[in-house]
Amino acid sequence: MEKVLSVHSVNDYARYVGAPVLHPLVRVKTGGSASQYIRHFLMQKARSMLHEGRSVSEVSDALGFEYPQNLTRMFKKEFGVAPSKIGKNGY
């Protein structure tokens, strides 16, 4: 029987083995559903891109949202603030 390493984040896994790609036998415990994990990941990426100075429309396009309003709605739900309020010096 093969042993399975359970970690709480991909960063933990990378720290353990020094590789950014998950091995098929590694499971990441997120404490939520897959869709919640993906939504959280997207919003973290969006926040990072906004801090770089990219516009909401640019971020929306880059992350695959059909309309910028959809990104705005999801971002407000995740962080409690509109993405237009985020900038290089904000939030």
Image (cartoon, grey):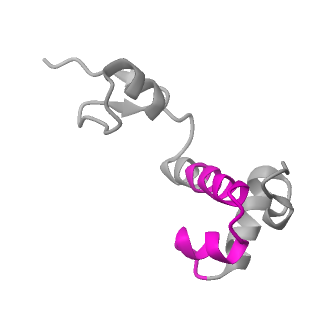
Horizontal and vertical percent for residue 88?
A: 78, 54
Q: Verify whether residue 15 appears in magenta.
A: no
Q: Quadrant of the N terminus?
A: top left
Q: Nearer the viewer, residue 69 or 32?
A: 69
Which stretch appears magenta? 40-66
Q: Nearer the viewer, residue 61 or 89?
A: 89
Horizontal and vertical percent for residue 19?
A: 31, 31
> Residue at the spot x=57%, y=76% of the render?
61
Outermost residue to the left: 1
> Residue at the spot x=38%, y=23% of the render?
6
- Which secondary structure type mostly characterizes the magenta part of the structure? helix
Give the total number of marks visible in the rendering.
Answer: 0
Horizontal and vertical percent for residue 42?
A: 58, 56
Is residue 10 left or right of 61 when viewed as pictured? left
> Residue at the spot x=84%, y=48% of the render?
91
Above or below 91: residue 84: below
Q: Nearer the viewer, residue 60 or 50?
A: 50
Q: Picture quarter containing residue 26?
A: top left
